Image (cartoon, grey):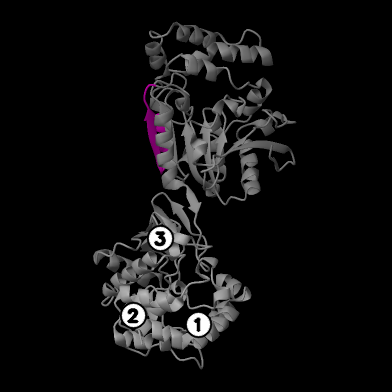
Amino acid sequence: MPTYRADDDTPLHYEELAGPDAVGPPVVVLAGGAARHPVYLGDLAGLAERHPLVVPHLRGIGSSPAPVEPEAGSYWRQADDLEALRRHLGQDRLIVAGHSAGTRLAVAYAVRHPDRVAALVLVTPPSVHLVDAAPDAEQIAGRLGTTEPAFAEAWAALAAGPDVLDDEGFNDWQRRVAPSSYAHWGPAEREHASVGRYGLPANRAYFSVDPPADLADRVRAVAAPVLVVAGADDAMTGLAPVVALAGLFPAGRVAVVDDCGHYPWVEQPASFRAAVDAFLDEVVEVPLLGGDVSEGVVRVGATVRRHPVEGAAAVHAYLRHLERAGFEHAPRFLGLDDRGREILTFLDGEMGGRPLAPWAVTEDALREIAVIQRRLHDRSADVSLPDGVSWPPPLELPGVPSLFGPGDADIVGHNDITFENTIFVDGRPVGIIDFDLAGPTTRVLDVVTTLRYWAPLTAPADRDPALRDADAGRRMRIFADAYGLDSRQRGELLDVADRRFTRAWHAMKYRAETDGGGWARMWADGAGDLIRRSQAWFRTERASLEAALTGS
């Protein structure tokens, strides 16, 4: 079982649950009880199928040792254990889910470490200590008591308390009061109630430190998104106080699950999963494979978040122009989030490589990307930028001429349509992403950049295996025909390609030295040498490429 060290050097244990399709950062799940073994949580109605779950054994429970001092086992102090777990997991922020008494620990962590909380999921939380809503648990209990004899017996036992206050007596009492936590008492509920032993010393320690008197005010300062899940028939917490708790959080919301009590994932698993999945789809940040110089790109639901680059305002205006022009193959720019990151629509599908998939390099795919680029160019001949927004000036490289002169740009182009920046569905290109390098250019130059990767204009030994035996000249001709290059453009293309190789080497070297990051990594990995080898191959093969391209 995985182990981490608390700040006091105590070894604490946790379980990991994840299905084969689970992606994204882990959800840390805190058991209730208080002090019940987390086995009763199961996989939360299959939540682990989509999201990795990390389930700590709290102090004195399961494999984690009892605290030397009871206060160390309080939910208020165990917030420090969660922070140590966050560091151990290597997460910048945590998604924390808690059930019942486990929500007290989740809230304690959120108010003590608000900058380290990505989201909270509070399942049937006790709330009367935080809100002024009138308690309604007794009314719910009275209503349910007419439907099942076991309920009345359980509530009588709950009111009486344990007969013997030791560990065995406490667990026996928990078994007798168990029906009071459900809206039904059928086979599934009976089986669930029998799972997960309670620890009396850990239970006492859990409540050994009182939270601060201003806890409710501190909850109001937690900015993270919060989902509160309430059982409509929860006679433990009631309904009204739980609903009111969601209102304390600035970004709180509530999901009321009908016809269930304190364990919604047991009594109404489909409704519970739907509510939690919908919430996590909005808040979970799933890292995406960025390009060579794109870092920190994540998916959040149906959107992509990424840090803006130089000239981002012009790119944003360009994407809005493409949306107005009806270009359906690019993400839409939706604005900036509260962390200053771009919000873009997520294009569903898969990218072509690395290494390249066989379906990405078919001649049909080549024709499709040529058609998409032509559509892009036709809608990019007249792009107006808002007042005060301009494209970054062209990179000045001493002694290296520009690839086109002032006033020669006839479009705004993508300038980097690689396989990695192409989205495929069923083996067909349907979209292009990563417009960071977009800017004024010429049709021919932007086509040359695309052919650099798609023909490819590279020596066979340096190609991806899927294109190692490709006939670059034939693929250039297929692309040119599908795009609709005229004879003048075809005549210019090879000259532009040769000059682009020269400038690309100098530009790459400059970027590596001045910008560092991904540019420096590519240069250190031999990108400059690759450009030189590709240019040498291109010059050797130029005559045959020209014959294939022009049909001469």
10 Å crowding of disc 1: few (<14), some (14-19), many (20+):
some
Q: Is residue 19 above or below residue 175?
A: below
| Residue 200 numbered mark, or none | none
| 537 vs 218: above or below | below
Eye-nearest disc, 3 or 1: 3
Graded by Cα atoms within 10 Å as few (under 14), some (14 to 19) or many (20 or more), the crowding at tag 2 reads: many
**Residue 238 falls inside the magenta stretch:** no
Bounds of the magenta segment: 243-259
- The mark found on residue 443 in the picture is 2
Expressed as whole percent of the image width and height from the top left, the position of residue 178 reads: 53, 15
Counting residues from the start of the chain, the first of labels 2 and 3 encountered is 3
Residue at which label 1 appears: 504
Q: Which residue: 41% across, 49% down?
A: 301
**Sequence-first tag of 1 and 2:** 2
Image marks 2 and 3: residues in contact by CB distance under 8 Å = no
Marks 3 and 1, how far apart at CA: 25 Å
Q: List the residue tagged with mark 3.
A: 423
Say left or right for 221 vs 442: right
Q: Quadrant of residue 492?
A: bottom left
Q: Amino acid at mark 3?
A: Ile
